[in-house]
Amino acid sequence: MGLDPEDLYEVDSDVPDLTGAVLLHSFEGFMDAGSAGRLLTEHLLDGGDNRVVARFDVDRLIDYRSRRPTMTYAVDHWDDYDAPELVVRLLHDADDTPFLLFTGPEPDHDWERFCLAARSLVERWSVRLTVGFHGIPMGAPHTRPLGLTAHATRKDLIGDHQPLPNRLQVPGSIAGLLEYRLGQWGHDAMGFAAHVPHYLAQSTYPASSVKLLEALTKATGLNLPEGDLREAASVADAEIARQVAESDEVADVVQALERQYDTFVEASERDSLLAESVEHMPTAEELGSQFERFLAEQQRGDNPDR
């Protein structure tokens, strides 16, 4: 207690005026189904020049023994060390509008002090909006439009996104706590979670990243080109379709998920989720687990050394 939150980071001495900029964030270590957040982060960083404007002290925030960084051993010596970084980078969109991207491993310690440190940066740079993004597993087929959950410190930030119909208690995350605390401190913050078919949650699913990119563009007004992300999504979708087509059993599973999805959509449009047919259908978890097993078997078949 009493430690200065600003001691957690160092700021570049040559940062331009960022008044009204947007701060995006995606932290590793919490849920990110389909690697939705990771792929989008990589896409943004590959989109042009960027530089670090704030660097956090990972030695004080990360438990190395629970998440051991990778080291490379070459013949008779240690050749490389993949040091973790928790940094804020300055980027520019296609219209040369500056924005910030906060990435790195989710802190293991000092969550409240970390949030206070982030707040000090938001206020130092007069950030107008902070936005997080990641993927969550959902019992829906890949052949239907991807869903998206939006949440924010003010209802009008969410726009036309449909809220969840109920109240949930879930394991906490630094992204969730940061949004919550920023709202308490009077700052606008929001987050997006792309709905990834849960049988693809452990795979790389670029379509979910495209969904997040579209949401970020609309919410922030930034001009963030899709680049190769859309093409990667098309390639992945084609591979999934190929695997489904090669198995009648899996095709039946997907069709059952489609029926369940369509039934729920139809029922929700009637303001009721008590459709008679749903009671006699396998759950999305049961159907998805069959598909997961199939994909695992296919991967083993593609790599006989496993």
Image (spheres, helix red, strand yellow):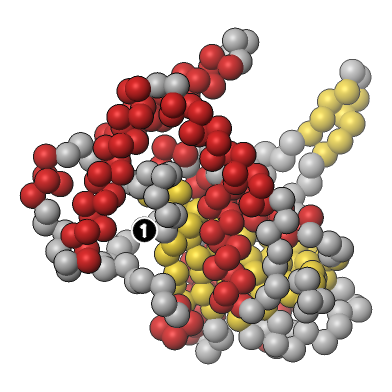
Which picture quadrant has residue 158? bottom left
Give the residue number, with chain letter if any, for mark 1.
170
Image position, residue 80 (x, y; %): 86, 36
Residue extending farthest left: 276
Q: Position of residue 218 (x, y in %)?
A: 57, 74
Q: Can I make out residue 234 in this image?
A: yes
The crowd level at tag 1 (other Cα within 10 Å; few <14, some 14-19, many 20+) is few
Name the residue nearer the viewer: 75 or 259. Answer: 259
Q: Residue at x 59, y 69 (%)?
A: 216
The structure residue drawn at horizontal position 54% and vertical position 22%, both measured from the top left corner, is 299
Above or below: residue 138 compared with residue 131: above
Q: Is residue 64 left or right of residue 300?
A: right
Q: Nearer the viewer, residue 73 or 113?
A: 73
The quadrant of the rendering that contains the N terminus is bottom right
- Whether residue 1 sits left or right of residue 254 in the image: it is right
Q: Residue at x 43, y 44 (%)?
A: 142
